[in-house]
Structures are given as C-alpha cells and as structure tokens.
Amino acid sequence: MLSVSLYASFGFEVKEPLLLMRGKPVADALKQLCAYDWPGNVRELGNVIERAIVVGRGPRLTMQDLPSRVVASVARPSIDGRSYRDAMEYYRRELVLAALERCHGNRAAAARELGLHEKYLLRLLKSLAIGI
C-alpha cells in the first residue's frame, strides 16, 4: 500500500513530469488506488495512473479518471482471527457507515439505498453502536 501511495503521489522517474502536470490525487482516488488488488503489480499501477493523467480532465486525479475495474473494486477486510459473528458485524457496520456517508447522514435515504425499512436501520445503528 505504501508503494501505491508513493507512486500515486510522486511517481517514478519517467512518469514524474506527467504527475506534476496533474497534481496529487484527491483522497477518494488515492484511497481507491490503495484498495485495489493490483494483480498486474506495479506495472499495472503505472499504466492506470498514466492513463488517468492523460485522459483526465481536471487539475487533479479523481475517481472519474480511474478505470471502472479499479473504481468498482471493494477492499476486502481481513477477517484473520475473527469469529464468524465478529466478521459479519464488522461487514454490516462498514456497509451501513458507507451508505450513511454516501447519503450525507440522511438515515431515510441510507435505509432506501440499503433496501431496509428506516425503523430497522435505526435498530441496526443502535446494535452496532453507530451514533448519528
């Protein structure tokens, strides 16, 4: 993950002038770059960043500049050493928090997005100790 952050922020030798043209990536784009599995390793990372710089439109790299396969990827939480119950609670908590963030804290909208009744979401927030 550190290499992704360093590469995305500063670039390597030849790619550095391109990165200076566009500036550092915004937090969401950098977070997504770090979350992606990178099956092609650093070479794939370099190609994705170079493509985003060349085809991107704004002064900084954003989520819209990244390929759909990178944007669509979801970081898988490590469940090493966790019980089934703990892992499920962790996943439910992350799912609810992400929906609330996308809906700017609006519980009714988050419930709709998750396909839940608002009353159930309220009980879920209480059981997961999520205060809004």
Image (cartoon, rainbow, N blue to C red):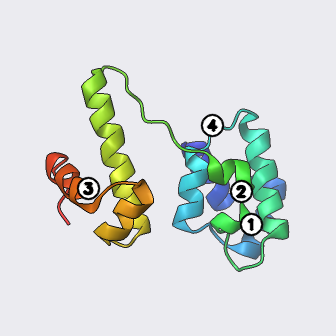
Q: CA distance from mark 4 to mark 3?
A: 31 Å
Residue bearing the label numbered 1: 19
Earlier in the chain: of badge 2 and badge 3, it is 2
Q: Secondary structure at mark 1?
A: helix
Q: Residue 37 or 45: which is nearer the viewer? A: 37
Q: Secondary structure at mark 2?
A: loop
Image height check: is 57 above or below 31? below
Q: CA distance from mark 2 to mark 3?
A: 43 Å
- Residue 82 visible in image: no
Callout 3 touching callout 1 (CB < 8 Å)? no
Callout 2 touching callout 3 (CB < 8 Å)? no
Residue 81 location, x and y as percent?
31, 19
Q: Which mark is residue 121?
A: 3
**Position of residue 129 in the picture relative to residue 85 (left or right):** left
Residue 49 location, x and y as percent?
75, 56
- Mark 2 Cα shell of 10 Å, populated few (<14), some (14-19), many (≥20): many
Callout 2 touching callout 1 (CB < 8 Å)? yes
Name the image quarter holding residue 98: bottom left
Q: CA distance from mark 4 to mark 1?
A: 22 Å
Q: Secondary structure at mark 4?
A: loop
Instruction: Give the foreground label among 2 and 4.
Output: 4
Residue bearing the label numbered 4: 37
Residue 20 location, x and y as percent?
73, 71
Residue, x 71% and y 32% (percent of image)? 39
Residue, x 69% and y 67% (percent of image)? 64
Image height check: is 60 above or below 122? below
Q: CA distance from mark 2 to mark 4?
A: 19 Å
- Mark 3 Cα shell of 10 Å, populated few (<14), some (14-19), many (≥20): some
Callout 2 touching callout 4 (CB < 8 Å)? no
Image height check: is 110 above or below 104? above
Q: CA distance from mark 2 to mark 1?
A: 7 Å
Earlier in the chain: of badge 2 and badge 1, it is 2
